Image (tube, helix red, strand yellow):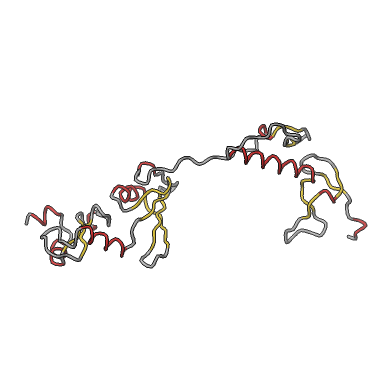
Amino acid sequence: MTDTNLPLSKQCAYCKQYKPLTEFRRRTGKRSKGQSRRGACRECRKLREAGNAQMQLQVKGAPAFKEAKTPHTSTGSKGKTRPRAADPRWKAPQLRGPKPDPQDASALVPSAKGMILMRGHSDKGRRWHQEIDLELAVTLVKEHAAVVVNRRTIRRLYSNKDFRAYILTRDNYTCHFCGLYGDTIDHLLPRAKGGHTTPDNCVCACNLCNQTKADQYVEEFMGR
């Protein structure tokens, strides 16, 4: 097709009027041809941009314009104009609610698969994330091992190295069972029986007590 056979006008997708090609923007996609044009003419494009700018100001709390010289309208299937709010395809922007309390585990809402996203950092400061079930996420928050970021995400507070240093410092390097010097960490409720590595479930212990207790309950170990 030569330049003389190219169409000199195009129908606007919004106002349905035939206008010269100079009123339309060129398409820049890889598959677009040299004379390809976008669907909105220059006048309709200005109306859309003005309507979007006014709506953003209203959402942010800024006062709306007192008089709109050219209110934004959308065209129906028959070419009739109607206000944008009456357009069934238009949806109002959804505002985010307030952030939940970092210690409020009841604010967590699982995904469709029943999972919660957990974030954290390694000993070298590298970030990681994984999905865990809701029950585990609630336990970690209640036992002060994690905090709530939003209703679908929690953040682990300690890396492995930081957690060990925190427990030993908190207990002053004193064994929870015998009162002697301790430099290891033991779980009050063993992990083999459902315990987790949290500040509320871990204590400082000496090497002998740690190995002797193994996977016993505290009452069982102390009463022997």
Q: Residue furthest left?
A: 224
- Taking depth in this image into account, of 11 and 169 the one nearest to the observer is 169
Image location of residue 153, percent across then percent down:
42, 50
Image location of residue 17, percent across then percent down:
83, 41
For image coordinates 42% across by 52% down, the residue present is 117
Q: Quadrant of residue 208?
A: bottom left
Image location of residue 142, percent across then percent down:
30, 47
Instruction: Specify the quadrant that holds the C terminus.
Output: bottom left
Image location of residue 43, percent across then percent down:
79, 43
Instruction: Specify the quadrant that holds the N terminus.
Output: bottom right
Q: Is residue 122 above or below residue 70?
A: below
For image coordinates 90% across by 59% down, the residue present is 3
- Taking depth in this image into account, of 158 and 60 the one nearest to the observer is 60
Q: Is residue 101 above or below residue 222?
A: above
- Taking depth in this image into account, of 57 and 31 the one nearest to the observer is 57
**How many numbered tags mark residues here?**
0
Q: Quadrant of residue 216?
A: bottom left
Q: Is residue 111 above or below residue 55?
A: below
Q: Quadrant of residue 198?
A: bottom left
Q: Along the horizontal axis of the image, is 71 left or right of 114?
A: right
Q: Along the horizontal axis of the image, is 62 left or right of 31?
A: left
Q: Along the horizontal axis of the image, is 190 left or right of 149?
A: left
Q: Along the horizontal axis of the image, is 72 left or right of 216?
A: right
